[in-house]
Amino acid sequence: MPDADELQALMLREWQYQLERSPVFTSLMMGDRRWNDRWDDRSAEGLEGDHRHNVDVLERLQRIDRARLGAGDRLNHDLMRRDYETWRDEYTCKLHLLSTSHLGWLPEYIRQFPAVATASQLASELRFEMSRDYEDWILRLERFPEYVKQVVARMREGVREGVVHPRAVVMRIPAQIEKLLVDDATRSAFYSPFTRFPAGVPEGDRGRLAAAAERAISKGVLPALRQFLEFVTGEYVPASPETVGLWQYARGEETYAFLARKFTTTRLTPNEIHEVGLAEVERLRAEMEAVKAKVGFAGSLPAFFEFLRHDPRFYFKTGTELVEQYRNLAKRIDPLLVKLFRTLQRQPYGVEPTPEAMAPNATTGFYVHGAADGSRAGIFLVNSYKPETRPRWQMVPLTLHEAVPGHHLQVSLAAELEGIPDLRRYGRQTAYTEGWALYCETLGDELGLYDDPYDKFGQLAFDMWRAIRLVVDTGLHAKQWPRQRAIDYSLANSPQAEYEIANEVDRYIAQPGQALAYKIGQLKFRELRTRAERTLGNRFDVRAFHDLVLLGGPTPLDMLEGQVDDWVQRMQHMGQE
């Protein structure tokens, strides 16, 4: 078999393998019903099997002669190799023992941060259109106790290995579990699909299905959740360290350096990233001072932060009003995009409040991908919990980041691409996806959205927030910062509310390295655009540049840089002809 054909066949097989081995992701994000009756396999045997499989795929890739491939397949080969090397190394670092935290526990992470659905939330996201959908959900409910046993076994393994999340984040889990515990199974969130049946479910099936679901929840799901709560409070919390940071674990420094490379897709070390963060914080403080002067505030920058945190003019009285204003803002942005973008997504999106059970521990807002089959639109979830902590001045950059032209535009365009493998269309390159979304926050100037200086300050505040992440994440995991120092540093340099900052710091503790992707990615997008603008001068077309960086799918930053440099050279050559 020619090398190109072998690579294409391998990529097709691997995509199907990933779908089958990640049934929660496949059900929720792809709209693929084939494994709707299963949970992910979290057994030791299953995880070891996946690891051996990944090593085998790398050996197969090595046997393919890259020199015999065309340019597109060389990129496919390189991307695939990097993904499988990353998954291999993640397993070797035992990161699967740290996958359960307040950000995601049952099911565990489904490769969609931070929209990590718990099993009960899946009930509201999946399609229930015919009897088979309900029967599959019942089978999933019946298999839930075994799945919980697997998760607990991995957490116990973490206790034995001394790989347990710190107390600050572990203590958030029990309250989340307690919200799912009810006395009446029919009041459980797991039962919600059975409170309404579509026309596609025959009347004669409805009673049988509802009774089976009630039985599965009362006899299996709820007891399993109670056992999980007992384990967390009785074993896991007592085993969790009071100190924070990966540095305290065996091979912790090595593991964090790996995560820094993984999430930034660069060779930057934690120390280098820390220095980049410090420099960005200083730059952004100077820009904030300029805005402060523009609005006529006479006090210091910390005093300005306090003014922004507490002045009633910047806050809504109700969560409902907050969500409605976000919807209005999204409608305002949509028609402006043609100024900067030649290609727009077809998939629609909506703006909805963050689910009540998730809101107290969730970030200000985040995006949930639409289902790949078009059965569910993308959703920009807005946290309306404690509206007195959600200022108006953060609305424009947050909408640009999470909805359009940020995550929704980028993710939807990638899914709608033709001629590239699914492994690339649905690729998970955090520095690319989050870097793009943060870059999009800066496009508000070009779209005319920052005419109000407070909105501009909001963009700077969000940019500062991501710069702080570089300092705080590396501080926590490489420089032995205590949690309170991270909170204090964030408060000193950001106008965010302390409640929100504490949530953010706990997120960095629970997901080492992930927060580095945003700023490093944004800086690379901006660097590449600036370089192209300076080189091409009047021949630079921002809409063509955006097509270039979006229509190849998610790409590691070093590979993206090569693509942009090649494009600039071609444009120069065309201009000289």
Image: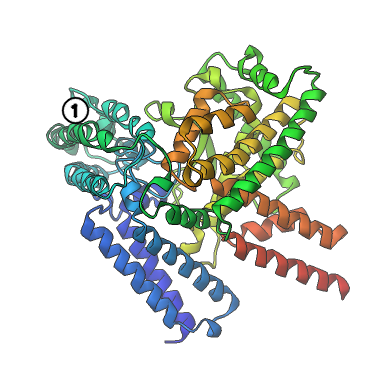
Residue found 72% across the figure and 67% down from its top = 565
| Residue 10 vertical placement versus 291 (above, below) | below
Q: Which residue is mark 1?
A: 185
Q: Is residue 368 left or right of residue 346?
A: left
Look at the picture and state if 488 lies above or below 25.
Answer: above
Q: Residue at x 36, y 34 (%)?
A: 242
Locate the N terminus by quadrant: bottom left
Q: Can residue 456 be seen in the rendering of this structure?
A: yes
Q: Is residue 424 left or right of residue 117?
A: right
397 or 140: nearer the viewer: 397
**Residue at the spot 67% in from the left edge and 61% down from the top edge:** 548
Q: Judge whether 58 appears above or below 128 on screen.
A: below
x and y percent of residue 34 in the render?
Answer: 29, 56
**Residue nearest the observer in this picture, 227 or 375:** 227
Q: Quadrant of residue 14?
A: bottom left
Q: Quadrant of residue 530?
A: bottom right
**Which image quadrant: the C terminus?**
bottom right
SS for callout 1: helix
Is residue 428 in sight in this rendering? no
